[in-house]
Amino acid sequence: MKINIVSVIAALSIYAGGSAVAQIGKPFIHDPSTIAQSDGKYYTFGTGGGGLISDDGWTWNSGAVRPGGGAAPDILKIGDRYLVVYGATGGGLFGGHNGKILTMWNKTLDPKSPDFKYSDPIVVASSDGIEDNDAIDPSLLLDPATGKLWLTYGTYFGYIRLVQLDPKTGKRVEGNKALNIAIDCEATDLIYRDGWYYLLGTHGTCCDGPNSTYNIVVGRSKKVTGPYVDNIGREMLKGGGKLVVAAGDRLIGPGHFGRTVLGYGIEKMSCHYEADLDQSGRSVLGIRPLLWKNGWPVAGDNLKEGTYEIASERRGYALQIDVDFTRMAGVARGFNRNNDEPVKPIPSQELADVINNWPTGNIGVTIGDYMFRPHQKWAITAVPGVGGYLGGPYYKITIAGTGRALAATADGEVITVPDFTGGPEQLWMIDQLTDGTYRIMPKVVPNSKEQLALVSLGDSTPTLAKFDMKSDNCKWDLRTH
């Protein structure tokens, strides 16, 4: 399916044994649309007419309303209205390949709002069941470079096609002829980034639960009309496409790509998984970071619970609590020593070796050379029952093996407190950036309305400050050892 520049979604839910699961609630959907924000909530529609609603982008439940039934809708906010597009019939499973694509408008997506009323649907594309196209799986792009509105549609039954719509009416531009832009895929989505148009398509087989082979591929072009070419120069009109995401982590068959741009160097991709093996094999809404490598979109990985080195991108030094360095036993080896001595491992320094030397109250935080010592090992754990944010749950960050928790202070600094209490200043948003590094941000800075992020003020000094995607001071690497 697809996503846009609106707001979006929840990912991963609770973690067990270090593996990610789908977002919480009942995120059950097939062919999810662009996720849109309306009246403070988040919405996505799916095949069949219904959809999901989320208050915070983390917990999803049914309740979205869309008339017309049909399959694979998309949503796009244009001005102060929402344009909804969907396919009626088509797709083979829905009564053959004679289909129609329809658009309709609404001022709000909230079914409880007095302004909630859909306009009459308008047919903007169709297929007769014989031609080499199937009018289903629509997607919308409002081109930020030209202001033009584009619609892609189609399945494996023939070509993927592109037509132009009027952004004021939602109707097809008079006299506009459909162009063939791809083949051997379906559920396409057009996005624009840095002068390139990207066509993402879903490849493989669907609708077969854990046996579905769906995966998402991409080609790009300098023109919206194509040709769309993959990373090895193969046109999508000839079956090309660079892999973006495939099955993994017990989640089978990702399809119906969607993109959301949150700003600050953070982008997310949405999809559905044909089968979540941890949720009865049901089709679920999926969200993960969207990375960009050498000009190509790549699915990032949702953060897994675990013990990490939190390393500053500034110089590679590690976040640590400010305690006296405890030396390990042993002396320098290799200076005129007997090389025939037996070789044996030296045990690593453990928490029990040093914790009794640490203060019992609040302890400050510094940055230093990483030596895999206990004061540099951080456990990152999702916190249940406290909600979430766009893209994930809130986390606690503690010294591994202890309750000592990283916290924001009213002075805009960071400390560790002896025990995690669940206070908002101890809850952290951790988002993967488009370059693969991370932004780490407290839910709340006490006595402040500003959103501040963890930054490296210097080689040895962490603090909280405004996030700047252009500065390595603001970026962190999470490394397992």
Image (spheres, rainbow, N blue to C red):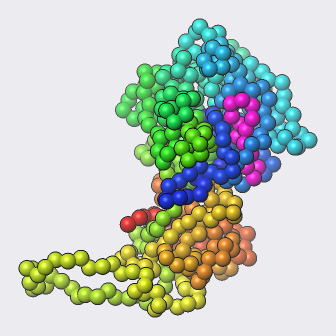
Q: Is residue 337 visible?
A: yes
Q: Residue at x 53, y 21 (%)?
A: 156
* Main secondary structure along the magenta-highlighted residues: strand
Q: Residue at x 60, y 39 (%)?
A: 282
Residue 120 location, quadrant? top right
Answer above or below: position of 362 versus 116. below
Is residue 344 shown in magenta? no
Say whether residue 433 is left or right of residue 140.
left
Disc tally is: 0
Magenta-tinted stretch? 41-55
Residue furthest toward the right?
114
Residue 396 point in image, percent of width and height: 59, 69
Residue furthest toward the front?
280
Q: Is residue 441 visible?
A: no
Residue 458 point in image, percent of width and height: 48, 76
Residue 18 point in image, percent of width and height: 49, 59
Residue 383 point in image, percent of width and height: 62, 65
Residue 430 location, quadrant? bottom right
Is residue 46 shown in magenta? yes
Q: Residue at x 54, y 17 (%)?
A: 157
Say whether residue 199 is left or right of residue 66.
left
Query: Looking at the rendering, in which quadrant would you find the C terminus?
Result: bottom left
Q: Residue at x 48, y 23 (%)?
A: 184
Query: Looking at the rendering, in which quadrant would you find the N terminus?
Result: top right
- Front residue of this view, candidates 174 and 160: 160
